[in-house]
Amino acid sequence: MNAIGSVHSWDVSTGVDGPGTRFVAFLAGCPLRCQYCHSPDTWFRRNGRPTSADDLVTEIRRYERFLKVAGGGVTLSGGEPLLQPHFARTVLERCHEMRLHTALDTSGFLGDRADDALLDAVDLVLLDVKSGDPRTYRKVTRTGTLSPTIRFAHRLAERGMPIWIRFVLVPGLTDAEPNVAAVASIAAELPTVERVEVLPFHRLGVPKYDALGLPFPLAATPPPGPALVERVRRQFRERGLTVTTA
């Protein structure tokens, strides 16, 4: 059956959403409302275009040879791709048939929706751990709880799946040393974590909020300075983790 999904957009990029040059499909719809979200235009499935798996895979095929030569592959991002698990699984399985490396960019909040067949078609999970402290997690996401992400992370590790942890560093929101230490503890307990990406907060999404007539919750928050970024990176390194900054 040709699954139908809601696709907001797609792009081809290098060094951002997994190894090599990648075709990144942004699926529409997300259950979280993170204060630092830079893509409010992907919050609802209605923000995307109804797209069949066949049509999206046809688009991917146009770049197949280039992606393979560039050591890349395909990443499903969002929004939250696990809001559309059947569509995501179908596309990922078709990409695997092409022998393309696949990555899933997810918060893990809907990890229980990813069945074994979907995960069998994933080579790498980019896991966005919003915070390590449950109260901070709730404050960041304005709706979610931390436990589903931790449960999903351990399931991935038990399957032996490679994980890249992503952590957005926001002054005054996620930067507290105990919160960072808690994220580092989560990552250190997962034997398949290959790296941690510390992503400094930015305000590049502000024009999207303006266009939608929405207030940006962190309009008065500055990006983190070099000293803060280094302190946070050091906290992860002290747990034996490989750390990068985007």
Image (tube, helix red, strand yellow):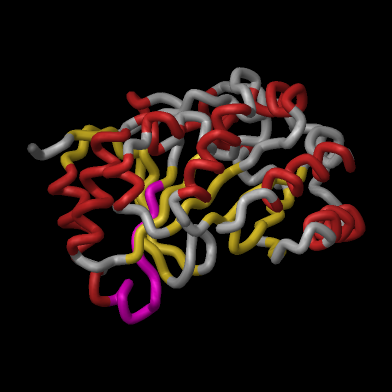
Q: Quadrant of residue 168?
A: top right
Q: Between 92 and 224, which is closer to the camera in this rendering?
A: 92
- Residue at image location 71% in from the left, 36% down from the top: 131
User: Where does residue 167 sit, x and y in percent of width and height?
Assistant: 68, 47
* Quadrant holding the N terminus: top left
Please indicate whether residue 211 sits to the left or right of residue 48 in the image.
right
Q: Single out the residue that lies furthest toward the front.
A: 158
Highlighted magenta segment, given as a residue range: 66-76
Quadrant position of the C terminus in the picture? bottom right
Q: In the figure, residue 72 lies in which quadrant?
A: bottom left
**x, y percent for residue 144:** 60, 22
Name which residue lies at 49% across and 42% down.
155
Tell me, yes or no, whether the highlighted magenta stretch contains residue 18: no
Looking at the picture, how far across and down is residue 166, in whole percent? 63, 50
Whether 69 is among the magenta residues is: yes
Task: Check the image and name the residue furthest to the top.
Answer: 143
